[in-house]
Image (cartoon, rainbow, N blue to C red):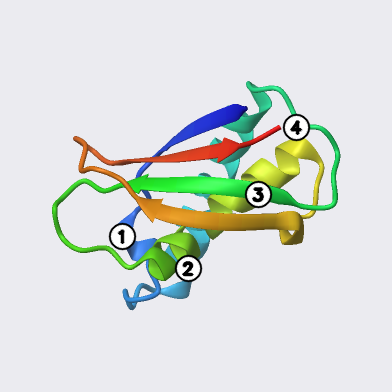
Amino acid sequence: MIELEFLWFNRKLSPNENAHWGTISRLRKKQRWDAYIIALAHPKPEVREEYILDITFHPKTNHKQDKDNCIASIKGLLDGVADAWGVDDSQFKPIPSMGEKVDNGKIVIRIKE
């Protein structure tokens, strides 16, 4: 199993925020680049038709989080992982879950071999 760990996303990337498109673009590019670098440091999974991604969101606070919004907020992250592995992100099948609150928040993605 491959396990990738990422920092919590900037709240301005949430669909519920009304951030300026330029801000969103800049944040998403940074998120994509950071994810690319992290994914390159791990082995690539074997080539397959689809990749089941167990994504666990560990929020910074105890506020209730919407899983769909969390997935939308990590679009750049998933794009960066896809870039590093040389796959199309349409092959990703995310299965989101909410984990326990942790300081500063984190996102853990597990890919089963």
In the figure, is residue 42 to the left or right of 98? right
Residue pointed to by mark 4? 45
Q: Does dot 2 land on a helix, a strand or a loop?
A: helix
Q: Does dot 3 land on a helix, a strand or a loop?
A: strand
Residue pointed to by mark 1? 11
Q: Quadrant of the C terminus?
A: top right
Q: Residue at position x 46%, y 56% from top?
A: 96
The type of residue carrying mark 2 is: Gly
The type of residue carrying mark 1 is: Arg
Q: Are marks 4 and 3 in contact (CB under 8 Å)?
A: no
Whole-percent x and y of residue 44? 75, 29
Whole-percent x and y of residue 2? 61, 28
- Could you say which quadrant of the image residue 84 lies in? top right
Q: Residue at position x 40%, y 61% from top?
A: 70
Question: Which label lies toward us, 2 or 4?
Answer: 4
Question: Which label lies toward us, 1 or 4?
Answer: 4
Query: In front here: 61 or 84?
Result: 61
The type of residue carrying mark 3 is: Ile
Q: Quadrant of the N terminus?
A: top right
Q: Does dot 4 land on a helix, a strand or a loop?
A: loop
